[in-house]
Amino acid sequence: MTSLAAPNNAPAADPKPGVPGLGSSLAGLWVLSWRGFFAWRRAPLWLAALVANPLLAWLSLPDGESTGFLHWNVHLYVGLLMPLYCLVVCGAMIRDEVQDDTLAFLVTRPLTRARLYLGKYVCQLAWLQCVFLVNGLLLLGVGLLRDIPEAPSLASRVLLAGILAALVYGALGGVFGLLTRRYIVLGLVYGFIVEVGIGHIPTNINSLSMLRHLQDLLAGHPAVQTRYDWSADGSGTGVLIILGTTLTALVVGAVLFTWKEFHASHEALK
Amino acid sequence: MALHDIRYRHWEGRHIGVWQRRGVIAFSGLRACLQNRWTRYLVGFCWLTALVYVGLLFCIGQLLVADSIIVEWAANLNPQLQAFVRALTTWLEQHPEISVRVAQGLLFYHYATFLITAALVAVALAIPHLITRDLGSHAMVVYASKAINRFDYLVGKAGVVGGLLTLTWLGPVLASWLLGNLLAPNWNFFWHSRVPLGHAVLFILAGMAFLSVLALGVSAVSSREKATVGLYVALWLVGSALEPLGDISRPWVKQLSIRYDLQQLARVVFQPEQDLRIAQEKVPIVGEVLRGFGRRPRAPWPPAPAATTWPALAIFALLSTGVILTRTKPE
Amino acid sequence: MSAIVQVRELSRWYGIVMGLNHVSFEIGPGLVGLVGPNGAGKSTLIQIITGQFRPSSGTLTVFGEVPWNNPRLLRRIGYCPERESLPRDLGPVDWLHGLGRLSGLRATEARARAERLLEKVRLPREHWAKRLSQYSKGMRQRVKLAQALLHDPEFLVLDEPMNGLDPLGRQEMAHVLKELAAGGTHILISSHILAELEALCREFVILNWGRVLASGTRDTLRTDVQGWSEQLQVRCDQPEKLARVLFDAGVLRGFQLAPEGDWLHLEVRDPEVFYQRWLELLLASGVVVGEIRSESRSLRQIFDKVTA
């Protein structure tokens, strides 16, 4: 039998690996993630993520129906589907590993837990950006097919909203996923209280609602501004708040992941 | 005495009936659901609302008799108000078939539709306990090794949803009817409230059957709890978000909302617009007020859309059945 | 060489459940067996060693460093978990490639090493295209061992690596582990299969109820165990005669004749004296001996004794 022993199978040309750099760890996590995203077993899920939203929009919107198109983009897509999808994808990034009992293979690798967490986030983020890019472009196509005059000018703002939504809701979803295995419920509670509740009540803390800032960004489009009577004045600040919240959530997530132990047996279904 | 009777052969023992076996699946599933404290809180909340409706029924009952405590209370406030209330109650007392039926019809319509949200939450909590965990833990093999077939298994699992919905939906409505009418001024209330009761039971049973099939279908989609609960929540939330779009785009979009479909089903069964019309036409003074209400540009209750509600429910149920049959196919 | 793992007053609690209770010991170099019944604390200890859990109190160091969130140390440790769970949607090469990149290997190197290791753990090439979720228990164990070896660790921690392997697979696994040990890799291996551990390991740590009951080589364990007595089974043509000769010589604490056959069970008073005089007494008795078994030398007996 061929030897597996270190001195025999590790000649000079095959030195012992060191602590991986950022690129190597990101590449490793991407290899481990992308197969999961595109597995044939999950084909219905990723197909649904990519095309269900534009397809339904195309089926349900009559020709030239600008109001419906705006409603679809602003309320349904940016206001509901984007946060929900970010929550599901990023909430699962660590929790799925715990539930599948495969986290041990990752945390015993020679990289810090913070880097592992951030690397996982970047991988999920890349997938989310792909999905939102495809969705945004297909929605633009739906708008053009349905003769919606606002579609081309709105598309760039929807795509930008997608980038920011993925950043911030992905980071928040990651924290929810670390906090509890019922992260979807926690995310919904957060959504109802902060995004819908606090965000729609004129208080000093309504800036906590990220949706509000995304709406400010969309309000830069004249049709959205007129239709919903929103102001685009605070969109620059809104973007900064979104980026700041993302950063804060990532730091919280990284600290939490570094500090917290995960027990697969505690994930036993109750 | 020996610890084990080594002569025992299970195939020689007395077998329990198939319904008992289905019942075992249903009860063990229901017990598992109720181990979740949020499910228990939900059930408790639903029964608390039943008490509220019992209170409302008590007040309505008191309105329908002369010299009731409400009339006396009105007299303390204003003698003219007492005269009005006394005149109204005298008329209502003479026409219990209208007053009791209409009042309870509208009340139970409201209560049964109010509890739709609780029922939808209950289903979300039950979904992991149905087929999802059996798929994940390969418990299907264990079921397959027992003296039950796939149909028995599915009936048992549907019983889990049925049991939970009985606790959160049918039970509170029936209890409020029973207690409310026990607190009514006379026994005729039981007789005159038979139609609202029948409507409530019919609607809730139809809703339960639909939700059971839907819950089993969603539960069978994946072996992962997260995926099935997530799909159900997405179906619910996205459907609800599509409802307002139906007013400005194609109307069928509304039918994608489960909640909307169930509300429309309630309208098809209860036909509250008829109760309202009777009240408008026959109840003195109150009818005047309601007529004004009905003359608004957008009527509160346009005719019940039976033509679109049943097909929408049927499509959801068919899709669910397809998923169930595919995913629980014996290997 | 100094100890690889040093444990001082280590306790680990899971809420009110005790995993490890105030234990202190050292794990030396070479192949070391971790023995204990279910719930003894083996997996808890392994998970602390590999940086998955932290101690509730006390310290545990590997190569002098604390394992939790310590990439420099984790680079030197390879871990093969007990559970069979593997990623569902990946094939073995992709999985090992990804983990290799995470371990600091370059892309081409990671793939090449993945393929080489899969060959070494004897995973047939025709199964490489399959997803890991389609693998049998034995195949999963092989892939798990391969991932533990990816970054060429100095210290290999294996939690029940023989589970699910058929006898041939176990033999191959044992061979691989022996070669690794011979090459200088230190290995900590936990197993329920004591006979196989016994054949593999030089040193043992016996755990039960979160406590270390004994540790050391088999010989030191035997001498350390209180009330230990050497026991022999002898198959001979005249068991009664042999028993009488040995008993009269005063080297036996007791003996027992098997009810049927030609076996004699002996309980030795002092092993050193007994083995000095054994040949002389045997020749004097004129009894023809067919077989001798030393039951008391087996790990199973030591284990039974200390966990009793």
Image (spheres, helix red, strand yellow):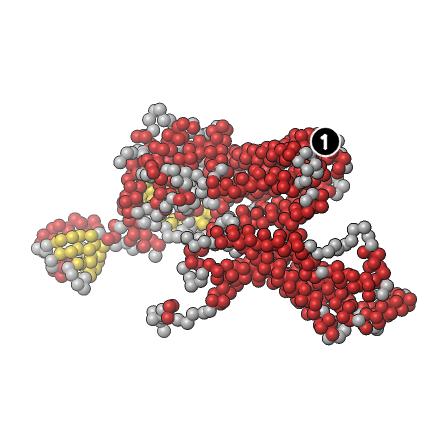
Q: Nearer the viewer, residue C217 or B143?
A: B143
- Spot the residue most to the top: A13
In the rendered structure, the answer to whether residue C37 lies left or right of residue B135 reads left
Residue A145, quarter of the rendered image: top right
Q: Nearer the viewer, residue B187 or B94?
A: B94
Name which residue type carries label 1.
Gly
The percent position of residue B311, horizontal first and vertical second, equals 62, 53
Q: Nearer the viewer, residue A112 or A34?
A: A34
Which residue lies under the disc numbered 1? A220
In the rendered structure, the answer to whether residue B276 lies left or right of residue B173 reads right
Q: Residues within 10 Å of mark 1 (few under 14, many from 20)?
A: some
Residue C85, quarter of the rendered image: top left
The percent position of residue B154, horizontal first and vertical second, equals 50, 59
Residue at screen point 53% across, 54% down: B321
Residue at screen point 26% across, 50% down: C298
Asked if B233 appears above or below A230 in the picture, the reply is below
Residue C32 in sight in this render: yes
Q: Nearer the viewer, residue B306 or B319?
A: B306
> Secondary structure under badge 1?
loop
Question: Which quarter of the figure is the N terminus of chain C placed in?
Answer: top left
The percent position of residue C216, horizontal first and vertical second, equals 32, 45
The percent position of residue C233, horizontal first and vertical second, equals 19, 55
Question: Which quarter of the figure is the C terminus of chain C placed in?
Answer: bottom left
